[in-house]
Image: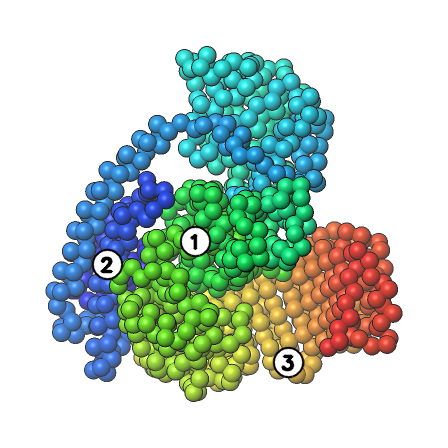
Amino acid sequence: MMSRLKSWTSSPTDNAISKSSLLWGWAGLEFLETYRSPVADEADPLEMRIADATYAAEDVIESHIVDMIKLHQSTSIYRMTKIYSGGKASTSVGSNKPHQGLQKVIKNMALVKKEAMKITGVVVEAQLQRSVSASAGFSSRSSIVVGFDDVSLEIMDKLTNGQRNLQVIPIVGMGGIGKTTLAKHVYAQPLIQQHFDICAHATISQNFDTREILCELLSQANKRSKEELSNMSEAELGLALHKYLFRRRFLIVMDDMWSVDAWDEIQRFFPNNGNGSRVVVTTRQSKLSSQLNNNYCLPMKFLDEVSCWDLFSKSVFGEETCPLELEETGKKIVENCRGLPLAIVVVGGLLKKMEQTKGCWESIRKNSSSVVNSADEEFCLKILKISYNHLPVYLKPCFLYMGVFEEGRAVRVSTLVKLLVSEGFLKPITDKSLETTAKEYLNELVDRNLILVHELGSTGNIKFCKLHDLLRDLCCREAGKQGFYNVIGQHKFQGLNRQRCVVIPGGISKEEVHDALRSMPLARSFVFHSEEVVPLPDSELLRTLKAYDRDRSGSHHYLLDDLFEFVNSRYLAVGVHGVSKIPYSVNFLWNLHTLIIFHSTWVDAPYVWGMPQLRHLEFHKGDLYLHDPTNGNTVIMIKLQTLKRVNLSVCSRDTLTSLIPNIKKLEVTGGYLPNLSSMKKLESYRYWGYYAMLVFTFPYSLKKLSLGSDTSHWEVNEEMLEKIGALPLLQKLKLERAEFQEGMWQTREEEFPSLKFLELKWCLLKSWMTESSHFPLLEKLHLYGLRQLEEIPCEIGEISTLQSIHLEYCSESVVESAKAIAEEQEELQFRVVLLKTNQNLPLRSLASPNFLVEIDDF
């Protein structure tokens, strides 16, 4: 909301809505964003009023902007450049109505703010007065321990390994993954109890009480009842605990810690006796674990398939075996738990009480996540929701938004970042782009173990993320309560003003979609997962339309003229048809941030240079032909960061670089840029076309570089390779169909100082000469279709940072040289894919634990 307010202050509005009114509203919203709800399980009525006040402000301001733009469209006198330079609007739209509407909203905000201030004071006082039951979490509910053999041995070794200094051992992972179960299991082992003179434990929780924790630990240490210690102050308890632990070897388990503040308050009472004392801390916060111990932590992993089934069987049948007729359905239920012990135990406990029939079990299988979160008085849901309740206000919408994606879906981070920016969830920070802020928010959710890393990119950044199914169910439940978004077919309709985001899942009939779109005319965001052709929503204030996904087959196809009627839009990702040119009407999209178009052929784009808010312009499958700007409709696009699949053959390339000074990602399919080095902020450059060999200079800011051609080979000479090798920040290099001069590549010292990923594909290369010091940071090497290469230099295997080598369709001699490296470097991982030929079949015998060989039928 804060980012949307900021954009309104520079919008094409007239004096009907004063900037001072906007700023006043901004100040009110800034306070309301700090409000912490005292309501734990249901939707907070005051939060709903805050949301309604926000929505009302949106409606008043953006309706006025849209009305003004449409008036200028209809009279054909609208000029975006004039508006952005302060030109006055027509007097016919300068009525007092928008001002009155906004004043009404501001008054309502003031009332909500006043009520929120009262509640905030009560919440703070209640939290200060709340006492922690310091051992309840650690001692409650009996636990079945399965799949923890290796990690138990690892923790026990850390506890007893002879290191004499006091050590902190963090155990970190998402809620329900078994941190407390593991800590309890190890704590109770006779070996551990005998090794330490004193063993004590306490549950910390979010609103910790230092005195209560000290009292609990001292009571367990000196075997005195807590009643006997009730008259002692916090300082007296701490001093007594320190005195009792002094010169004794102790083990303290601090379960469920949420902040370093709790550690700072208590750790000063733990003496470093130099006798092998230990403190074990369980936490959901990865950042906290690194604050406690920079050198070691135990990250909990999901259970494997065998352990999941073992835990499930013991939860349902005890020592008995699962009946054969239920085994197939049971394993599907377990699979739906996605390796989370808490989910398996809860669903197992539910099935234990139910009739043991296939029909009963099938009913559970069909809706596992929702059933697990509802079972046992919502025990599982309450455990997981603690993490959500502990989130700062600015992270909650980002977390909830993950629920708009389908269950089990891996979400591309670059797509998610663009959506978070366009939805306005991010608070603008001076000298920091909204994209950077979005990535920081996502990283924080990963650190809190709410979002899972699904796949890392070639340079180590998070490429795909996902939610555990139970956390996604939590997102959908909370979103439904708050009216944050509406999933058609799942959520109840909550009134016209409440439905701002609509999710259209797969399997929904056209009639349901039509009815939903008609009933929610004020919806701002539409996310399509349905493969059915969905009509465009009838929402003139639409902000986000996601109807194309690069990671999914298929796309909804629309006419650009229809799409560009949504003049308030910030994010459009769509497939289009029946178009050869982006129309002039694109300039009326005054606040468009992201335009992603899927089209099978080429499209002319002569009118994109009048869009000052545009940040990302991507074309998929076809080519987007850029033209020189037309007179009177040109702005320097300082916010533009991404241009993808653009053809520069019909535009003045010297002029182009001056129009996009802050471009970070550029993908060119035709033409070339002779002065690429002038793009000082360019981080990723991909050129796929005939002129690849003409690019001789690159900016030193480059981190990713891809050069190639889909059809013919192109010559890469020694001079170009030297210039590429000299790029100080380059982390990823891909060369396709490159013909190396005389078939040789000889690298040199001090080249490729930052390179982590190298891919050579269908290149004409016979001899490669290098040293391990020439690629000091290389982690991954991909070689594809190198039929002429004689061997991989053995020096490659000596690179200390190298993790894996991937070969596809390479020569037999290359595979054999890779095997020689694998035998010398057993920690390296190799994957070899070969065509199914009589010559290649014997190579299958080279397979070993670190050398995977696959035969492709092609």
| Residue displayed at 71% across by 52% down | 801
Q: Which mark is residue 475?
A: 1
- Do the numbered discs 1 and 3 sit on residues whose CB atoms are within 8 Å? no
Tag 3's secondary structure?
A: loop
Residue drawn at x 57%, y 28% is 253
Q: Is residue 38 left or right of residue 338?
A: left
In the image: residue 159, left or right of residue 395? right
Q: CA distance from mark 2 to mark 3?
A: 51 Å
Closer to the eye: label 2 or 1: 1
Amino acid, disc 2:
Ala
Give the residue drawn at x 58%, y 20%.
Answer: 271
Residue bearing the label numbered 3? 710
Per the image, label 2 sits on a secondary structure element best described as helix
Please tell me in which quadrant of the rendered image residue 485 appears. Answer: bottom left
As drawn, which residue projects farthest toward the left? Answer: 96
Q: Position of residue 742 (x, y in %)?
A: 78, 76
Distance between the Cα atoms at labels 1 and 3? 43 Å
